[in-house]
Each structure stands twice: as C-alpha cells, then as structure tokens.
Image (cartoon, helix red, strand yellow):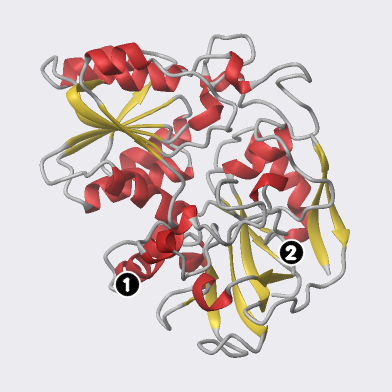
C-alpha cells in the first residue's frame, strides 16, 4: 500500500509499505477513505516536535471503513464507516473511564508516564503508524473507533478526528459561558474551530488574532472580530475594545509556531519554511526562546481571567510568563484533547445541522500529491487552511 513515511527532519516520502495486519485481539484494520495534514505533522517534519523514529507512517486524522476485526472486537464489523480519534486510549483505565482519554495509562507502550499515545507521532508517543495511508491498524478498536452516522459525510467526520474536538476542548477547558468575551490566538484550523466552539457555548464576542489574510477572513466569516498582529498591537486593540478590561478568556491555538529560533517569538518567522529544511537548525531547542503568543495572551486576558492552551508545545519547552500570570490571578489550563470523549457529541451536532464544519476544508488532494500538499500547507499559502488527502484505496 502507499503511505507517507518519515525518514528524518525535512525528509518525508510517499512509499510502498506492507499493509497492516491484526496483531492483538482488540485490533481493527481500517481502509482509509480520507485523511488530513495537521499542524502537528509539520512540527514532526520540522523537528520542533523531536524524537521521531525513521520509518514511522505519518498522520493522525482519518476516517474509513472497517475491513477486518480481531476476536476481541464485538461492536464493529466489516463495512462499518468509522472516524478514528487522533489520540489513543484503552477504554478501561481510570483516566479513560473519567473521560481523560488522552491521558490513558495503558495505550502508550512506553508506560503510563510517557504521555499521550497518538498516531504518527514521536517514539515516546508509541510510536504508532499513522493514517496518511491506504490502510491502518487501530489498537483498542472497541474504544478507539466511532461509527459515523448515516447523515454525516466523510468530509464532515474527518474534521471530528482531531481539529473540531481540539477546538471544542479548548472552549470547554476554558469554561466558556454565555456572555463571555474570548480571544483566540492563531486562526489556523484548530483556531477556527475554537472560534466556532466558543460561539456554540454562548460567547458574546470572540476576537481572532493572526497575520494571514485568508485565515482572518475565515474567522470574520464566523462572526469573530479580527486583529492582524502584523499591523497593530493585539493587546492594545483587545483592551481598547473591552473598555480597558481585557477578555474573560484567551485560547492559545498557536503553540510552538509562536516560537522563533532568534528569540523574537514572532509567529510568521517560522511559518515560511518548506518541509525539506530544518528552520531551527541542529542546535536550536524550543525551550530556548519565548512565545510571543503566550506573552500576548497573559497581557490580553482580564484580571482573574482564564488562559487555555491547546496549541502544541514540545515537552522540552520551558518558557512561560509565570510572574505576570500570578500577579494577575489568572487560571491557566493546558492539555491534549480527549478526542474520544468529544467525537460522539460533535457528530450529533453536525448531524443535527447546527454547524457545517466542512466549509473549513479548503483543499482536497490525492495521496499521490502529498509532498506538494505538505509544502503548500507548511508555507501557509492563501487558501490552504485545511488539507484532505484521498488515498487510492478510497
């Protein structure tokens, strides 16, 4: 089968690899009908999320059709349409039962303290082969598959594999309530769904901060008040539009993209990089530089407000304006999304016609064009907000 394989920083290839097979009784084999490219994939290609094992298949977003199940899978059968949650849980440990499926004690073979297990990630996350392929093995399948309702398309369900749940998780973790004012830093795919989710939860006003015109226009289309940080001071604008108070809640949907190797922390300084190169250099580490987004977030939120961090930061990151956050009595929350917990809820919302998430799916490309798609997505070319990949097997 064809799959996107990681070989080193800046070196990914579309290759022929063996098809996956059942390895454990709770496994399922899924014929992938659609996958996607995510900002996290860019982090591993760039080297800002280190520890990737050469030969790992990339990708953690996918939908498909069940081809085969192990003897321990009793709730799915061949032919079922399913969405695959990006993070992996066992379904029976105390964390999974409490809904913290991204903190599963069992799924990660490196042990309960190794961190979140997910597809196509660094060696510390499993590693588990990813979903940018024609077929994929899903472990703990009774828990890690969700049936797609008949009235939900593959395109809609694909966005529930990762980015819609992650955006919703940010709004939920921040405890957005009716009447709240919210600022979302970063208007990429996750940021767009954080904006949507804040409005779903009743936010009165949402401010969207970015520097890319097409992303700001997409945010404006959702009703957000847009701020171009390349043209104006986002903190000053937010304070000016809120009577000097600041917003009740800030959601950081940028992550390590807001960190630059020269210490300036300007997001667009790490955006214009093709995946064949390592923008940070061999001796640079994300822990060495400040994050402009986090600085702005702490300054823009009202006293006693809430900062929710859903943008990806690597484990070695060691920067945060803790003194200023403490002085302002801020509540700071951060984490990896518990995808399996949110996906059924969001599928119901989509099926009910409340939202149409596929409007944010801006590009559809065959898997055979994946390298060109990675380059365009990495350079943030206009119109490349979210990329769907269609395997030949689809």
The structure residue drawn at horizontal position 55% and vertical position 42%, both measured from the top left corner, is 383
Residue 36 seen by the camera: yes
Residue 381: image x %, image y %? 61, 35
Question: For numbered disc 1, what is the local secondary structure?
Answer: helix
Residue 364 seen by the camera: no
Count all numbered tags in the image, as a single digit: 2
Q: Is residue 317 above or below residue 99?
A: above
Q: Is residue 126 above or below residue 295?
A: below
Q: In screen coordinates, is 278 left or right of 390?
A: right
Q: In screen coordinates, is 1 left or right of 375?
A: right
Q: Which corner quadrant holds the C terminus?
A: bottom right
Q: In screen coordinates, is 255 left or right of 393?
A: left
Question: For numbered disc 2, what is the local secondary structure?
Answer: loop
Q: Which residue is mark 2?
A: 133
The structure residue drawn at horizontal position 20% and vertical position 28%, both measured from the top left corner, is 305
Q: Which residue is mark 1?
A: 348
Residue 201: image x %, image y %? 20, 51
The structure residue drawn at horizontal position 73% and vertical position 59%, both measured from the top left corner, is 129
- Identify the image quadrant of residue 331: top left
Residue 269: image x %, image y %? 59, 18
Rounded to the nearest angstrom, the CA distance separating label 1 from label 2 is: 27 Å
- Identify the image quadrant of residue 14: bottom right
- Identify the image quadrant of residue 289: top right
Q: Contact (CB < 8 A) between labels 1 and 2? A: no
Q: Is residue 189 above or below residue 92?
A: above
Which circle's residue, 1 or 2, is located before the other in the chain? 2
Using a 10 Å C-alpha cutoff, classify the residue at mark 2 as few (fewer than 14 neighbours), some (14 to 19) or many (20 or more).
Answer: many
25, 205: nearer the viewer: 25
146, 192: nearer the viewer: 146
Using a 10 Å C-alpha cutoff, classify the residue at mark 1 as few (fewer than 14 neighbours), some (14 to 19) or many (20 or more).
Answer: some
Residue 108: image x %, image y %? 62, 56
The structure residue drawn at horizontal position 83% and vertical position 70%, both measured from the top left corner, is 1
């Amino acid at each position: 089968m064809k799959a996107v394989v990681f070989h080193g920083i800046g070196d990914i290839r579309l290759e022929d690899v063996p098809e996956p097979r059942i390895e454990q009784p709770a496994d399922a084999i899924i014929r992938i009908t659609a996958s996607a490219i995510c900002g996290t994939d860019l982090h591993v290609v760039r080297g800002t999320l280190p520890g990737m094992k050469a030969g790992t298949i990339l990708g953690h977003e996918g939908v498909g059709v069940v081809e085969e199940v192990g003897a321990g899978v009793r709730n799915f059968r061949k032919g079922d349409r399913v969405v695959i949650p990006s993070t992996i849980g066992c379904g029976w440990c105390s964390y999974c039962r409490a809904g913290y499926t991204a903190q599963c004690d069992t799924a990660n073979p490196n042990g309960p303290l190794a961190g979140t297990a997910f597809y196509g990630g660094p060696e510390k996350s499993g590693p588990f082969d990813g979903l940018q392929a024609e077929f994929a093995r899903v472990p703990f399948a009774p828990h890690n598959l969700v049936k797609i309702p008949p009235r939900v398309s593959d395109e809609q369900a694909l966005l529930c594999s990762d980015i819609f749940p992650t955006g919703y998780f940010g709004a939920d973790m921040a405890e957005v309530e009716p009447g709240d004012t919210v600022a979302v830093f970063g208007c990429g795919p996750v940021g767009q769904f954080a904006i949507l989710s804040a409005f779903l939860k009743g936010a009165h006003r949402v401010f969207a901060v970015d520097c890319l015109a097409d992303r700001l226009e997409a945010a404006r289309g959702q009703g957000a008040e847009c701020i171009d940080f390349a043209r104006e001071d986002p903190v000053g604008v937010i304070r000016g539009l809120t009577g000097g108070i600041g917003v009740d809640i800030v959601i950081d949907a940028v992550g390590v993209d807001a960190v630059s190797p020269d210490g300036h922390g300007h997001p667009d300084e790490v955006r214009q990089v093709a995946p064949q190169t390592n923008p940070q250099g061999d001796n640079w580490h994300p822990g060495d530089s400040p994050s402009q987004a986090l600085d702005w977030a702490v300054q823009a939120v009202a006293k006693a407000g809430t900062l929710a961090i859903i943008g990806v930061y690597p484990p070695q990151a060691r920067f945060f304006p803790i003194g200023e956050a403490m002085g302002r009595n801020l509540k700071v929350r951060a984490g990896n999304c518990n995808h399996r917990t949110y996906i059924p809820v969001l599928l119901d919302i989509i099926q009910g016609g409340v939202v149409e998430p596929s409007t944010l799916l801006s590009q559809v490309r065959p898997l055979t064009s994946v390298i060109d798609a990675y380059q365009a997505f990495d350079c943030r070319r206009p119109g490349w907000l979210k990329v769907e990949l269609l395997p030949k097997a689809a």
